[in-house]
Image (cartoon, helix red, strand yellow):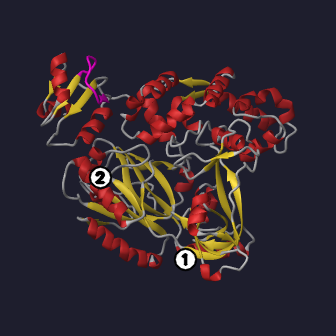
Amino acid sequence: MLSLSNGFSEDDIRDFSDKICRFLGVSETTEIVCEPKVDGVSLSLVYEDGKLVRGVTRGDGVTGENITENVRTLRDIPMELEVKKGEILPQKVEIRGEVYITRINFEAMNAKQAEVGDKIFANARNAAAGSLRQLDSTITAQRPLEFFAYALASVSDDLSFETHTDELHALQRWGFVTVPFKAFGSVDGLLENYNGMVEKRFELPYAIDGLVYKVNDKNLQKRLGEVARSPRWAIAHKFPAEQVTTVLEGIDVQVGRTGVVTPVARLQPVEVGGVTVSNATLHNEDYIAERDIRVGDTVFIERAGDVIPKVVKPVLEKRPEKADIFSFPRECPVCNSNLVRLEGEAAWRCVNHLSCRAQVEAQIIYFVGKHGMDIDGLGQKQVQKFLEDGLIKTVVDVFNLKDHAEQLKGQEGFGEKSVTNLLESIERAKQVELPRFLAALGIPLVGYEVARLLANRYGTLEILQSAILDKPDDVESIDGIGSRIVESLQVFWQEPHTQELLKGLLTVGVTVMPYEAPQVADNPFLGKIVVLTGTMENMTRDEAKVRLQSLGAKVSGSVSSKTDYVVAGAAAGSKLKKAQELGVAVLDEAAFLEKLS
């Protein structure tokens, strides 16, 4: 389950439309469907022969939590799909949607919780998430959960739809309540509707934090495909964040996993968007200076994207006489190393990556966490405690915890059984697939989806390392991998610390398993090296590249004796000439399209 890219301004949405037009090689915007972005919890439902067989949370986007028994208690989710006489029912279908709680039901639920002395929920979204994940499904059944279906993620070959709206109408016929939706033929129509919804959103019975725009034509969706983290054919148009004022009582600095030192505002607690906020980011030294933010100021606070609290600006007319100008430290607040600010960057960094306690702690927590090696029983508190007691000093030491089994049993919360479970989980983690290992390393800009793209292309850690260091252009040719990601990979791999870390992990028995990309059906381009040149009439070069890569081809930017095909559109130049000189097979557009089909 991919995330959606976000747009916050009119320019962002026009740029989204322009990119679609460029990719498809058309001059006019295709029809776009608009839906409210309900502030709830994403859910995947699988039906086989019309019957619900599985309900799963989004999880990390690849692996979710099976909550089928709890899902069966939601009245908006049919246990069996309804079909009209003569309608074809798919043998298997995956339906996605959002579980939410209405405003009025949330208030009533919290009042009921308070009456009996139970936990009060901070907001409706957290309440929905907690209710869905109950171990006892009878508790879930008592919560006022509702469900909007918003998409068919997959459907067996016995049924197909031409448009997204056709899918939504089918969902309604099958017994689902779908998100309200409306189709627009222009960006101006989308923006006019958005401006109206900004004012009306609080009149809705449920919370929304923006609108979602999707290309309606399913064939165009398929052609547009996806980048590493999100589909090209959809975007979330977020609403302006709610702003409130409070007093800035102080500024602390925190050291992150990569050494970036971030200033954090200490605030008089204030409620923003249903959440009590007492800390908020100030980003960097320049952000504070440009806005003249001072300790003691009354400041505007908002939750960026309705998630991360940040200080927006001071209320100058309320500034006290003795408001202090903040002086950014030049030494690391944790290890006292000198901080460095590279030319062209806004961030100050502690470069003591090996010995700075804050960095080491954050690196280990990320490495063992859900988005990394996913080691059960080893969370933030355990890592902090093991560091304190000297049981671990680095990521590598995690795999030597078996040598401290007796000492672990004396730790708070660790009995004999929990220690055994932890050590077994650590042992299992030693056999790891390449995408998960890459994600665990915490390389800037490289999450699981980017890691999967890299693993698809190179298969093993050794081949990937060689490509990063010696063939960066080849890495950048992967659809979804840009120059900034390649630069980040090179910087990371060239660090002596990285080589020391990799060597250490191999020494303690960590094995990065070769990765086999999902099998691509046999086709004329599978395993071939293809070069695109010239202009085509029926698709853009970007689309041709994506289509080829989806078929298992490697798309190169230069012609050599190893090239299998050169696809030559109109006005092809030097690449076509070189192909002819080398005797490389040349396909005109018609021949290329024939092979594609």
Q: Residue at x 45, y 55 (%)?
A: 79
Measuring from the top left, give residue 285's x and y in whole percent. Answer: 61, 58
> Overall secondary structure of the magenta stretch?
loop
Q: Is residue 557 magenta?
A: yes
User: Would residue 512 appear left or right of 154 to someone viewing this image?
Assistant: right
Single out the mark in the foreground, 2 or 1. 2
Secondary structure beneath dot 1 equals: helix
Kind of residue at disc 1: Ile
Q: Which residues are magenta?
A: 554-564
List the residue tagged with mark 2: 19
List the residue tagged with mark 1: 104
Q: Residue at x 17, y 27 (%)?
A: 576
Image height check: is 77 above or below 417? below
> Closer to the N terminus: mark 2 or mark 1?
2
What is the C-alpha distance between the residues marked 2 and 1? 40 Å
Q: Is residue 266 magenta?
A: no
Kind of residue at disc 2: Lys
Q: How many neighbours does mark 1 have within 10 angstroms: few (below 14), some (14-19), or many (20 or more)?
A: few
Q: Residue at x 16, y 18 (%)?
A: 581
User: Would residue 516 appear left or right of 283 to someone viewing this image?
Assistant: left
Mark drawn on residue 96: none
